[in-house]
Amino acid sequence: MKQGINTINITLKVWRQKGHKDKGRFETIPVRDVETHMSFLEMLDVVNERLTLEGKEPIEFDNDCREGICGMCGAVVNGIAHGPEKGMTLCQLHMRKFSDGDTIAVEPWRARAFKVVKDLIVDRSSLDKIIQAGGFISMIAGGAPDANAIPIPQEIAEKAMDAAACIGCGACVAACPNASAMLFVGAKISQLALLPQGKPEAAKRALSMLREMDELGFGNCSNETECEAVCPKEISIANIALFNREFLKAGFGSSEK
């Protein structure tokens, strides 16, 4: 133990895979003197430095902002997307949440729609394709002053903002037994359908995004609620219910019923 700094010794079991067509495996890596104030990604940085000095290939993992905003850092830690702490991304998880001697298993998102790029990195562009299929409005909405001129009940505005907090990390897909993207799509549907600007295209949006989700290989929702439990922004499954309502209204040929 370093003087004045709490450290622990852990054993990492990390998924290593060269590409989506290659067979992957867990690699066991003993890690000594991990400083407990480190974030999980900082710990991986240190491990990679040591592996590089030993002439070994470092662990590939995704990251960007490291502030819980971008959603790129996603990985499954001990069977839980983003790790054991509720309402946070993997980059916000700190090593003080683990104990000396722990074995920590780290693996990528598991979903047919998320192909493994390498090790812990997966291709999540399928979520972008769902947005492209309908997660937008086509009208000219004007600037902020124009939006502020439209009276919207506070409760509705807050629900729309809560849905818009989704960062598209894919944890909901990774946690779902069916690899469903319904929480993600439901949030994107809700943030627009709840507001006046999003209502004219609500029916078309629901149909287009659901069709794209199915074509990309995501599974169906069976109300397991695992998605809500691991979402770093704590998006409510009530958004899935709203999505289903919009889909049913579209099926009846009316987005205003």
Image (tube, grey):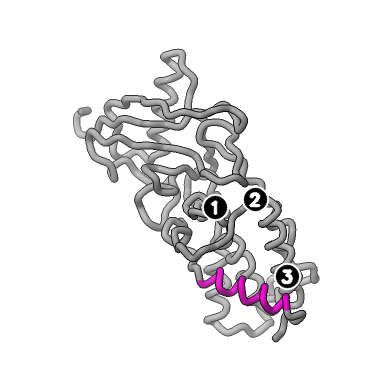
Q: Residues within 10 Å of mark 1 (few under 14, many from 20)?
A: many
Marks 2 and 3: which is nearer the front?
A: 2
Which residue: 67% across, 56% down? 214
Q: Which residue is mark 3?
A: 143
- In the image, residue 61 above or below residue 132: above
Q: State the residue position of label 2.
A: 217
Q: Give the side of residue 235 with respect to residue 4, left or right.
A: right
Q: Which residues are magenta?
A: 238-251
Q: Is 247 contained in the magenta span? A: yes
Residue 36 part of the magenta-drawn span: no
Q: Where is residue 233 drawn, in percent x and y?
A: 47, 60
Question: Relative to residue 215, is residue 28 depicted above or below?
Answer: above
- Which residue is found at the position 20% from the left and 34% from the top? 4
Give the amino acid at mark 1: Ala
Q: Amino acid at mark 3?
A: Gly
Residue at x 67%, y 73% (from the top left corner): 247
Identify the mark at residue 70; answer none if there is no mark: none
Q: Quadrant of residue 45?
A: top left
Q: CA distance from mark 3 to mark 1?
A: 38 Å
Q: Nearer the viewer, residue 95 or 203?
A: 203
Q: Is residue 219 visible?
A: yes
Q: Amino acid at mark 2?
A: Gly
Q: Which mark is residue 179?
A: 1
- Expressed as whole percent of the image width and height from the top left, the position of residue 151 reads 64, 85
- The quadrant where residue 130 appears: bottom right
Residue 129 or residue 55, whichever sits in front: 129
At 23% across and 33% down in the image, what residue appears? 101
Q: CB under 8 Å between callouts 1 and 2?
A: yes
* Vertical placement of residue 118 versus 144, above or below: above
Identify the element where label 2 is drawn.
loop
